[in-house]
Image (spheres, rainbow, N blue to C red):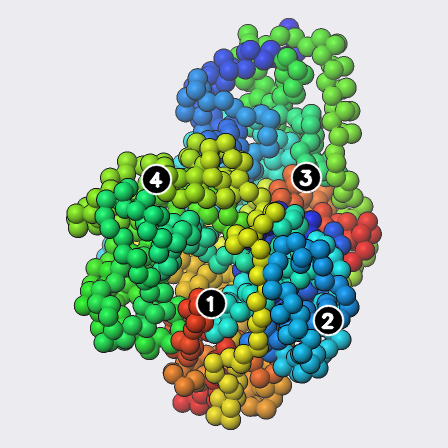
């Protein structure tokens, strides 16, 4: 997030796109609702009528995968209405002329047709967003999990820069992170092309700084992304894997290929707190300690690094992840794996990672942590990003063009399947939440959301089981008739191993981020005959 | 003969007194831990523990009498014959530094767990407990106990009630064991003067004027006896309830629980009970899948009507003690104060 979470309360316009915030990020949702109670305007872009979309002043229920067309249309309206922030554009950005000329060539009615939203509604939303100087955009995986995910984000950035709604309090662009510490994992370079703190892997000087501490040589070549690894295939280059706290055998797209990869590895080790679907395929399983049984830090969406303290001793033979890594490291003679405690690990992070430079344990214990960048010991941390300048200097407008999803609907597969987290009560592959009796009671099974109009045509009744089939696989799933989805679109979660919805999804990826298009694939469905 | 009902304890005598009490029973008091959270904690070493009487404890006394999860019985089978083992008996416990709202809640729970038969584990714990309260001179941000007649000072129900007069505590004794304590440890105390009494009344008056929230609880209760709540109010509230159960879990008077039998092997098992929440859809869902409550419209209806309408009708008092914890915890901002404001017309939907 460029903002802090608390700033959302003070915003005057909140544009939420591709995020079911109140269900999946309830704490952030709470701030958004508080802003609305204060009188802020809420605009939600989502193909589904989620709870937060119901509470929005304007819900832009776009056809899945048409985000760029919608944002371009909004930007065109902003130009037509003369609502662009000329001063911000000239001071802080570049390449505006190219974007302006491109937008002027677009036909608004054509864009409206692509998105399935009427032109007047787009016009109204664009004006509300642009007229306020305290407008915030929050986005989530509904924006990024597309073959055009990177461009979707670029379009969102263009919109914010066009109206000058960035670089100050209560306005910015906020990606909401989906796991408690996914921000920290990225910061620590659990990414293929960077070193900790997003430092360039290709830079020899930076590499040598790490090599001096780690006492080894670091390959300069970019590694592989998650989906590339799990879709390595049976003849791929990867022969062994060590998977920690991830369940790709349920969460990754096109599961047929994932299982083919995992089953044909020469060696697979998995570390998790429960025996997940992935762990069941492993040669060796490490029983990891849960969050309550270990210490360390967690970095949240607003870049805040917080200490997480151990509440209970690890049960039986479970060990914290850091212990497992260090012991493995020692056994393969990897130097520099001799940390006495978490504070010592943090000291090395501070030493090598400029944005974490001032984050020592004693400081993190105060004020519920610190927000990066925090480059030196007395630095107070950073509330919001991009004040005075962007990371690259001037913000660059990049033209983004609408691009159809990888898989189009056709006669044989007439429905669009959207997947995502489907319940407040379950988290991702439900590795943890399905071990809670109360949460299971609240959400006991997978359901396929389908519009009543489609049910009438297919003569389906609520709760009936259907076979849902794509070009890659099929699952059986009971339906839930609802107005949350529009006709032609169906939705299901990926929480339940009995209904592995990712058997159906496509593994086509965004060329830059390598994020798979989990939000759109084409399916058909038919009633399952009773015996 | 001195009057044992009301005495003064100078502040420098507090820890010496608590040290004596700790010898008689387990002593539990609010303690601020290393992470800045104030929680009721068993005092192991009174010399190194600082009792926190400045902040509101994050939890009420509920977990000590109705734990989040407890084994109510365990069983074993041998040759087809079942043997049931009751849980461990309760320990003598003195609670110190309890706020008025939380004791009022405990008195309400006494009522709930006494009918139709006395709940064995609850009353075992209750009969082994003595509660020493601390009147609130300065209400916390979300408190409204004045509106629910459960504070800031109490008239009855306590073992002992402490009121902070600055350099000393004005101590009042309740029935039974509280008065016994004053008698037994009388040498720590001194007699009440007219000046102390005046100071106490003055502080009580001042405390009542310091609430930042003005919640019309009694008005809402009375109005509910005569009028139904507009459907749009229920719908507006339900839209924002995410079924986290947080309000019920932090509420000092929410006593709903579920019972589960859990086999621990072929020949033995346990029966546990754990907190539940009426806001959950699974709470009312039938085995066949039908749910008499439509969560999208009526998620919070039972909660608020129970507390404000039925309990007021049955016991003459709402079962909300104004502790304000649900105000703090609710993701959707649809706590009981929002409902009361909407219903009594202080805010239009």
Q: Which residue is mark 1?
A: A444
Mark 2 highlights which residue? A77
Cβ–Cβ below 8 Å for labels 3 and 2?
Answer: no
C-alpha separation, residue under disc 2 versus residue under disc 1? 45 Å
Residue tagged 3: B142
Q: Earlier in the sequence, mark 2 or mark 1?
A: 2
Q: Is residue A41 left or right of residue A416?
A: right
Host chain of mark 4? A
In this rendering, the answer to whether A79 lies above or below B233 is: below
Secondary structure under the numbered disc 2 in the rendered image? helix
Q: Could you tell me residue B335's position as x and y percent?
A: 67, 50
Chain under callout 2: A
* Residue A160: quadrant of the picture: bottom right
Considering the numbered disc 3 on the image, is that residue within a helix, a strand or a loop? loop
Position above or below: B339 against B91: below
Q: Cα distance, mark 4 to mark 1?
A: 44 Å
Nearer to us: label 1 or label 3: 3
Res A27 label:
none
**How far apart are the two marked residues, 2 and 4, measured between alpha carbons?**
50 Å
Crowding near pointer 3: few (<14 within 10 Å), some, many (20+)?
A: some
Q: Is residue A282 above or below residue B140?
A: below
**Distance CA(mark 4)–CA(mark 3):** 43 Å
Examine the rendering and report whether any part of residue B83 can be seen. Answer: no
Chain designation of label 1: A
Residue at coordinates 54% horizontally, 15% vertically from top-left?
B14
Tell me which numbered mark, 2 or 4, is placed earlier along the sequence.
2
- Disc 4 on helix, strand or loop? helix
């Amino acid at each position: 997030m460029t903002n802090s979470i608390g700033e959302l309360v003070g915003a005057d316009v909140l544009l939420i796109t591709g995020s079911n915030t109140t269900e999946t990020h309830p704490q952030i949702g709470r701030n958004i609702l508080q802003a609305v109670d204060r009188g802020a305007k809420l605009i939600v872009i989502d193909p589904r009528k989620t709870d937060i979309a119901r509470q929005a002043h304007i819900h832009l229920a776009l056809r899945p995968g048409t985000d760029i067309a919608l944002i371009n249309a909004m930007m065109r309206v902003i130009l037509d209405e003369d609502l662009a922030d000329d001063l911000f554009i000239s001071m802080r950005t570049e390449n505006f002329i190219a974007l302006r000329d491109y937008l002027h060539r677009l036909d608004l009615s054509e864009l409206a047709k692509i998105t399935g939203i009427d032109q007047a509604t787009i016009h109204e939303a664009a004006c509300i967003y642009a007229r306020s100087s305290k407008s915030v955009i929050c986005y989530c995986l509904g924006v990024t999990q597309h073959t055009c995910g990177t461009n979707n984000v670029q379009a969102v950035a263009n919109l914010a820069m066009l109206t000058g709604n960035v670089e100050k309090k209560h306005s910015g662009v906020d990606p909401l992170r989906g796991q408690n510490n996914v921000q920290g994992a990225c910061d620590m370079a659990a990414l293929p092309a960077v070193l900790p703190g997003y430092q360039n892997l290709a830079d020899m000087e930076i590499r040598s700084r790490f090599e001096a501490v780690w006492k080894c040589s670091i390959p300069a070549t970019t590694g592989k992304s998650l989906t590339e690894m799990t879709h390595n295939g049976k003849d791929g280059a990867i022969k062994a894997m060590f998977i920690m706290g991830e369940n790709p055998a349920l969460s990754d797209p096109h599961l047929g290929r994932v299982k083919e990869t995992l089953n044909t590895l020469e060696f697979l080790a998995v570390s998790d707190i429960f025996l997940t679907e992935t762990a069941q395929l492993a040669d060796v399983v490490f029983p990891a300690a849960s969050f309550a049984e270990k210490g360390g830090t967690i970095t949240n969406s607003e870049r805040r690094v917080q200490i997480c303290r151990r509440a209970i001793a690890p049960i039986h033979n479970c060990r914290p992840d850091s212990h497992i890594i260090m012991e493995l490291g020692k056994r393969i003679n990897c130097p520099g794996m001799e940390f006495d405690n978490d504070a010592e690990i943090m000291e090395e992070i501070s030493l090598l990672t400029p944005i974490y430079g001032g984050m020592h344990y004693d400081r993190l214990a105060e004020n519920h942590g610190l927000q990066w960048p925090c480059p030196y010991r007395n630095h107070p941390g950073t509330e919001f990003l991009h004040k005075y300048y962007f990371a690259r200097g001037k913000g660059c407008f990049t033209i983004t063009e609408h691009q159809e999803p990888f898989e189009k609907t056709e006669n044989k597969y007439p429905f669009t399947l959207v997947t995502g987290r489907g319940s407040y009560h379950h988290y991702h592959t439900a590795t943890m939440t399905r071990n809670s009796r109360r949460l299971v009671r609240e959400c006991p099974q997978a359901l396929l959301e389908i519009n009543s109009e489609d049910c009438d045509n297919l003569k389906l009744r609520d709760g009936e089981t259907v076979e849902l089939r794509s070009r890659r696989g099929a699952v059986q799933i009971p339906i839930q008739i609802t107005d949350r989805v529009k006709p032609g679109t169906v939705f299901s979660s990926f929480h339940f191993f009995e209904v592995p919805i990712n058997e159906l999804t496509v593994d086509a990826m965004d060329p830059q981020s390598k994020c798979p298009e989990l939000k759109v694939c084409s399916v058909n469905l038919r009633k399952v005959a009773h015996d | 003969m001195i009057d044992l009902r009301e005495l003064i304890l100078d502040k420098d005598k507090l820890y010496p007194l608590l040290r004596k009490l700790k010898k008689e029973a387990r002593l539990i008091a609010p303690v601020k831990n290393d992470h800045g959270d104030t929680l009721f904690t068993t005092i192991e070493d009174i010399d190194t523990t600082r009792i926190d009487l400045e902040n509101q404890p994050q939890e009420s006394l509920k977990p000590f009498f109705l734990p989040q999860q407890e084994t109510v019985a365990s069983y074993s089978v041998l040759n087809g014959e079942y043997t049931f083992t009751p849980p461990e008996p309760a320990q003598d416990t003195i609670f110190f530094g309890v706020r008025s709202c939380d004791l009022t809640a405990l008195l309400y729970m006494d009522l709930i767990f006494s009918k139709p038969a006395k709940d064995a584990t609850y009353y075992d714990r209750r009969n082994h407990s003595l509660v020493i309260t601390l009147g609130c001179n300065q209400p916390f941000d979300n408190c409204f106990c004045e509106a629910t007649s459960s504070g800031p000072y109490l008239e009855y129900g306590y073992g002992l009630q402490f009121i902070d007069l600055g350099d000393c505590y004005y101590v009042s004794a309740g029935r039974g064991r509280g008065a016994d304590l004053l008698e037994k440890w009388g040498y720590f105390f001194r007699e009440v003067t007219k000046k102390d009494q005046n100071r106490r009344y003055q502080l009580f008056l001042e405390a009542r004027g310091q609430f930042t929230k003005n919640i019309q609880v009694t008005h809402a209760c009375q109005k509910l006896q005569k009028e139904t709540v507009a459907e749009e109010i229920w719908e507006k509230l339900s839209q924002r309830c995410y079924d986290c159960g947080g309000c019920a879990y932090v509420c000092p008077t929410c006593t709903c629980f579920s019972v589960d039998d859990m086999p621990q092997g072929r020949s033995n098992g346990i029966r546990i009970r754990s907190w539940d929440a009426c806001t959950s859809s699974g709470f009312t869902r039938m085995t066949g899948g039908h749910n008499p409550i439509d969560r999208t419209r009526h998620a919070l209806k039972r909660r608020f009507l129970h507390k404000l309408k039925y309990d007021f009708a049955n016991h003459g008092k709402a079962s909300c003690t104004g502790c304000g914890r649900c105000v703090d915890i609710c993701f959707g901002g649809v706590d009981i104060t929002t409902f009361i404001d909407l219903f009594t017309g202080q805010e239009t939907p």
